[in-house]
Amino acid sequence: MKIQTLLPATIVAIAAVIVLVATPQAIRALSKAKVDAEVVAAKSRLTRSNALEEVNQATRDIAMIVEPSVLSLSASGSQKGRAGGSQVSTGSAWIYDVYGHIVTNGHVVDGAEEIDVQLHTGQIVQAQLVGLDLKTDIAVLRIEADDLTPAQRSIDIPTQGDMVFAFGSPFDFRFSMSAGIVSGIGRSAGLSEVDYENFIQVDAAINPGNSGGPLTDIYGRVIGMNTAIATGRGSTLGQGQFGGIGLAIPMDIIEFVVGQLIATGEVAKGFSGVAVQPVNSILPPQMRNPIYRCIVEHYNADGAVITRVTAGSPAQRAGLQIGDVIVSIDGVRVTDADKVPSIIGTRRPGQIVVFQVWRPLPDQGRGEEMKFDVELIKREPQMEAADIADILRNYGFATLATSSQEFCAALGVPHRRGVLVQAVTPDSKLAGIVPAGSIIVAVGGQSVGTLEDFYVRLARGAISRRGIGRTSAILTIALPSGTLSDFDIPLR
């Protein structure tokens, strides 16, 4: 009876054990079969139609289109470093036209005495400087080589979110490519060596060595030039490593500068005659003026307040006034004060630009929107450093001009790149020391090629990094005899 009683219980227990052991195995077998079926189905789908392969192929096609126009660049020269001594910098460049003109950043070749360029074929050739614009950090070089492939270019303004590709030689990894998107446009980073900032912000990796390389769109067209890494306002070009914010000069500015550098070696920039400050930086003493008080109390948006209008300037003739808040120029929104010189400085003299302003009406407790057509004139280089220009004139530099074949021939001196001393004031401190026909070739060891270069160098060097005003500048001058001499010129 005991066996008959235990047998059913034993069978149930055995069955339970079998279920406990077999069920997980069965579940795993079913799961494995399901995964295998999904893998087979996924492989089948990828074989039939693979969107990622289409993306891969498109990226490879962009590389194939762009790569022949990308160059690796090495520049060396004894004047390149502020601390002195021979230095070498590396960067990137790209082919602009079939005549051998190539484009890079000004800071890559600034002061270089020898520039070597490597083509995508591996061929290395020497490049000659055609022209450099310090304010926009753009330089044009020329090389002699056969079968050059110019880059395709587009001045279409990219949109936030557009895919872009950066080419260059980061950390000397030559002919590299990185991908990303446009993070923003019209950016100003407060870089200490660029006066006109209107950058494209991208998250494509840009590192030292990428400077001067092309930034392209999804069609392989160059829409900008990799220039800087944002590491904080007041930073210097080329410092730091990529942290997610790369900056590129847009193609419309490049076209504006490059064409003029090729044609004349210098850039004619527009001048309106206004000085501005940010809306949010109106100081308490200014609030005593009803105009500024009206702005603070009734204007609640971005913009730049006009603080000075030069007498007889295009802005005055058009009707702009102190206190007008510039909202946009030619439809480009003015988000901060830096935008105004950046926009105006990349327009040609004679061009008419439209200022949209908010004019405060303190007696009515409000303001009104107004538009003004301003016909720009040529910005004279000494306008950027008027005080220094006065000091130089008082010292004896009566007339200065960008050195040209024509001007040098008129004075009977050999032409060389720099700033020509056309006339010296009689009985001045300079008279008898630096005669007319002398050419200023460097300021503080930094080469100059145009009159604008000269004043930019002086203005940037007039204040030391500690904020203490410097009392003099060292000018390297080629005398008519061909002798190079350094002169310590007072700046006060």
Image (spheres, rainbow, N blue to C red):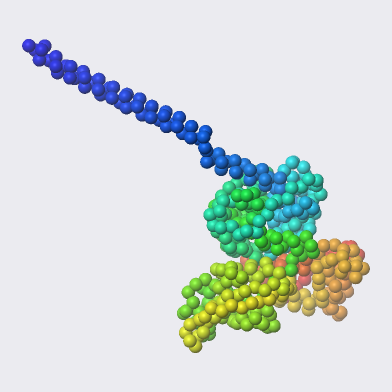
Horizontal and vertical percent for residue 235?
60, 60
Q: Nearer the viewer, residue 193 or 308?
A: 308
Q: Nearer the viewer, residue 29 or 400?
A: 29
Residue farthest to the front, as pictured: 48
Residue 376 falls in image quadrant: bottom right
Query: Where 227 falls versus 362 (above or below)?
Result: above
Horizontal and vertical percent for residue 191?
62, 62
* Picture residue at 68% right of the left edge, 79% below the top: 314
Residue 352 falls in image quadrant: bottom right
Query: Where 159 falls versus 299 (above or below)?
Result: above
Residue farthest to the bottom, as pictured: 363
Residue farthest to the right, as pictured: 412
* Picture residue at 10% right of the left edge, 12% below the top: 4
Query: Where 128 falls versus 379 (above or below)?
Result: above
Q: Does residue 347 show up?
A: yes
Q: Quadrant of the N terminus?
A: top left
In the displayed structure image, the side of residue 307 where residue 16 appears, left or right: left
Total number of numbered labels?
A: 0
Horizontal and vertical percent for residue 479?
87, 66
* Picture residue at 74% right of the left edge, 68% below the top: 268
Horizontal and vertical percent for residue 228?
62, 56
Q: Does residue 237 show up?
A: no
Q: Quadrant of the C terminus?
A: bottom right
* Picture residue at 62% right of the left edge, 59% below the top: 156
Residue 111 falls in image quadrant: bottom right
